Image: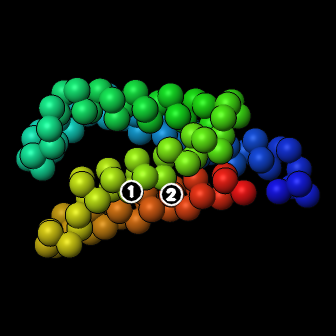
Amino acid sequence: MEGLPQALIFLAHSLIGCYFVFFGFWNIYHWAPMTKTMVDHQLPWPFLTLSFIIGFQIIAGVMLVFGILVKLTALILIPFVLAIVLLLHPFWKFKGELRKQHMALFVTNLTMCLGALLLLI
């Protein structure tokens, strides 16, 4: 990455960071349906777990945007995103339109894992 201009590195950090910040606030706005989804998936302590997830999304996103501990943040985000995507978007359990929606979210989140992997370079 030494050959890349600093502006491109900043842009990459900002785009990936803003993704996480956006979805942190999205989850706050959709608190009730997200809590219901977590209860439906039998996740422990939905209120506490969702609070942690939202806080982590926003804090990690802000850290990426401002270039704070980028590699450590990216390293922590990868298993976090993989766990969330496997727990909340198991598209193989659905049929029809719901399957398409979960598949799109599954692929989107895996793409964000790829972005986090690239931040490790």
| Residue 91 x/y as whole percent | 23, 67
Q: Measure the C-alpha gap from mark 1 to mark 2.
A: 8 Å
Residue at position x 69%, y 48% in the image: 12
Residue at position x 31%, y 67% in the image: 103
Residue at position x 29%, y 27% in the image: 51
Q: Amino acid at mark 2?
A: Cys
Q: Is residue 65 visible?
A: no
Q: Which residue is mark 1?
A: 82
Q: Is residue 86 above or below residue 61?
A: below
Q: In the displayed structure, does residue 13 sit left or right of residue 94?
A: right
Residue at position x 79%, y 49% in the image: 8
Residue 87 lies in what quarter of the image? bottom left
Looking at the rendering, in which quadrant would you find the C terminus? bottom right
Secondary structure at badge 2 equals: helix
Q: Are marks 1 and 2 in contact (CB under 8 Å)?
A: yes
Q: Which residue is mark 2?
A: 113
Q: Earlier in the sequence, mark 1 or mark 2?
A: 1
Q: Is residue 25 above or below residue 79?
A: above
